[in-house]
Amino acid sequence: MSLGTRAKRLPRVIPVLLVKGHGLTKTVGFKEGKYIGDAVNAVRIFNEKEVDEIMILDIEASLEKRGPRNTFIREIASEAFMPLGYGGGITTIEEIETLFKGGVEKVCLNSVCYSNPTLVTEAARIFGSQSILASVDVRKQLLRGYRLFSSSGSVAQPVGLVDHLKRMEDAGVGEIVINSIDRDGQMKGYDLELIKIASEAVSVPVVALGGAGAVDHFVEATKAGASAVAAGSFFVFFGKHRAVLITYPGRAELKKAFA
Amino acid sequence: MIGVIEYGLGNIGSILNMFKKVGLPCRLVSTPEEILECDKLLLPGVGHFDRGMTELRSRGLEDAMNRAVFDQGASLLGICLGMQLLLEGSDEGVEPGLGWIKGWAHKFPSDLEDHGVNLKIPHMGWTDVEVQPNTKMFRDWEDECRFYFVHAYYAAPTDPSVVAGKSWYGMDFVCSMEQGNVMGAQFHPEKSHKMGMRYLQNVFGD
């Protein structure tokens, strides 16, 4: 292979799997979860498809005020031969350390970013920025604009979007996942305005999440400033009746779309 | 037996998972005695250069690694920071490296571009590797070769003959080195699917 004529780099394309109980679910607007299947089995299939990276979010952990389920996560990690991120219920350095020892590369912090931002700073210092992500759940409200929510969309946070993003960047996170609650499960495209605001506010990579239903949506998100693109429904549903089927675009398809 | 060196840095869990999947027997080694029992060694590493060298020295592992590799002929693969530690030093810190391979680790400049778009540091993601086919690690490798990378510093070996693989991230850089039984990979084979499995088989298999 020659590096002489260089094709444009493809952004990372990241399936996000939502854990509920011991299975996977897929929400719409953070509600109405539909059962998708067994988590370990899904990771095995994504592994076969050679996905760029995978992210597992336990959407019940913060609501139930508990930490990560380590045995379960280790089981998933033992089948993940790609970079694996985990988010959900993390509130201590010890929990993060246990996750890394179990085979997780990146942790995704969300609720704790509001309740204890010094933990984010400490985690980035100890483990390195590249392994600490902040994920930010955003709802667009008619008169108030973008508002932030924690605990799987159940708790409104008073801090402004840009202020929070800058605070997370200052705390040392290596990436920020920006998730549109309104677009979640809609498969009609990302909130491009939100991605633009976020990627202009910070210089760390922004990962777009919420709304993707086609490869073209990935292209739109990167044009709006996203460094990587993530999705849930797009990778687990097929057809207009949303049959459960795990898919992942091939590199040829991505190269063509991003050319 | 492959000894995975445990010195407080690096994602040991992923590496053990990958060796299990590939079917190569391995164990964690954290003392000089354990290191000297191994004929194959893997030096992982995610984190700061100085912290890596300080941990290796304060645990007495540097001497053991030297003896294992140069007196007993063990092969050693450094991954990510573990590869940079093989060099004489790094822009990231002030501690001398292992110095087994002549050269230095430099930080990526902040003005790298791809088709007019500024590239963020660290370099994170999947990148193609141009391989030297006459190396142990890339022998018979004719098909697609790409690996997962996460790094802000890159190795710049002095001697071009140790270069086993090159990549591009707004600039060409050396992403793997091979100098006899001393080998290094800037990328993460343990997180690079089938390509990573094949790579580890090439390095550690018989």
Image (cartoon, coloured by chain):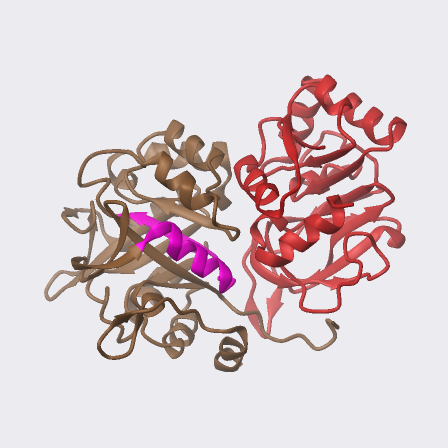
Residue B31 colored magenta?
Answer: no
Q: Position of residue B194 (x, y in %)?
A: 60, 58
Give me the residue at 27% from left, 50% from top: A23
What are the residue bounds of the magenta stretch? A38-58
Image location of residue A185, percent across then percent down: 23, 66
Say left or right for B33 vs A86.
right
In the picture shown, does residue B202 fall above or below A197? above
- Which quadrant holds the C terminus of chain B? top right
Q: Residue drawn at (61%, 42%), measured in percent from left and top?
A: B19
Which chain is assigned red?
B
Colour in which the image shows chain A: brown
x then y, percent, for residue B167: 70, 61
Quadrant in which residue A195 is drawn: bottom left
Residue B106 at what x, y percent from top left?
71, 47
Q: Is residue A45 visible?
A: yes
Look at the image and tell me whether residue A52 can be seen: no
Residue under the point 53% across and 73% down: A251
User: Quick one: A62 or B118, which is closer to the camera?
Assistant: A62
Count numbered badges in the picture: 0
